[in-house]
Amino acid sequence: MALAESYTNKHNALGTFFNALHEAEAPERFSNKFLEHLGFTSTNDRAFITILKELGFLDSDAKPKERYYQFLDRSQSEKILAQAIREAYSDLFKVNRNANELSPDEAKNKIKVILKGGKSENVLNRISKTFNALCQLADFSSPVEEAQEDIVDGDIPKDDTVVDSASGEAPQQEDVRRRKIGVGSLQYHINIVLPESKNQEVYDAIFKSLREHLG
């Protein structure tokens, strides 16, 4: 299951918290002491560290991961956060691809179904409000990348003409299809063990046969 269950009672302070990350150098380890250094001294603030872990900013030892460093670039931080949210709450986005646009109550109902009622209403409210607050800080405008399917068979697009580099002519459709599925990129290596012979005609006959059959 990919659904972050961490939450904070101070979801309204998440914006201030992420802005504080921009203002400070990344620590070797995101400890409670470093959190206090950022100005978050309440024990309730420690939930921010757990949230960073579930978003993929920190590893299990609270050491910054690559996503943390990418986030520090203000020009892309909102998109980095959106990507992190999509991954941390991927089950929610499977239910609704625009889950970031859900209200806290709508998100709570979806999360309740995903968790099969395994959380109290109070906890569900906090999870959904934390999710909603995170989404408000992120930029979801970039489309989700989808894996491209390989072309195995079927019609070749009319505007997808492949020209043979040797002749300068377009090959037959079957040749185009073969290149589409990558057959043309294969290389074959044939090892031939020649018999021992002092008769030159034996070797001439072998190489003549190779030229005729292998081109």
Image (cartoon, rainbow, N blue to C red):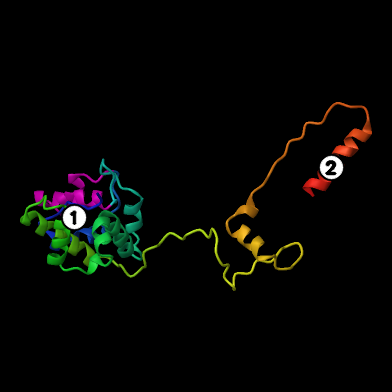
Asked if residue 46 lies in the magenta stretch, the reply is yes
User: Does label 2 or label 1 sit earlier along the sequence?
Assistant: 1
**Which range of residues does the magenta coloring cover?**
29-55
Horizontally, is 21 left or right of 193 in the view?
left
Front position among marks 2 and 1: 2
* Circle 2: element type: helix
Image location (x, y in percent) of residue 72: 32, 58
When the figure is inspected, residue 1 is found, relative to residue 130, above or below; the finding is above
Disc 1 marks a residue whose amino acid type is Ile
Residue occupied by mark 2: 209
The front one of 103 and 75 is 103
Residue occupied by mark 1: 114
The front one of 26 and 54 is 54
Horizontally, is 100 left or right of 200 in the view?
left
The front one of 131 and 70 is 131
Residue pictured at 17% horizontal, 61% vertical:
110
Residue pictured at 18% horizontal, 45% vertical:
33
Do labels 2 and 1 touch, CB within 8 Å?
Answer: no
Asked if residue 84 lies in the magenta stretch, the reply is no
Disc 2 marks a residue whose amino acid type is Ser
**Is residue 13 in sight in this rendering?**
no
When the figure is inspected, residue 76 is found, relative to residue 69, above or below; the finding is below
Q: Which mark is residue 171?
A: none
Dominant SS of magenta comes to helix
Residue pictured at 13% horizontal, 62% vertical:
109
Horizontally, is 111 left or right of 138 in the view?
left
Q: Give the CA separation, mark 2 to mark 1.
A: 68 Å
Image location (x, y in percent) of residue 8: 13, 55
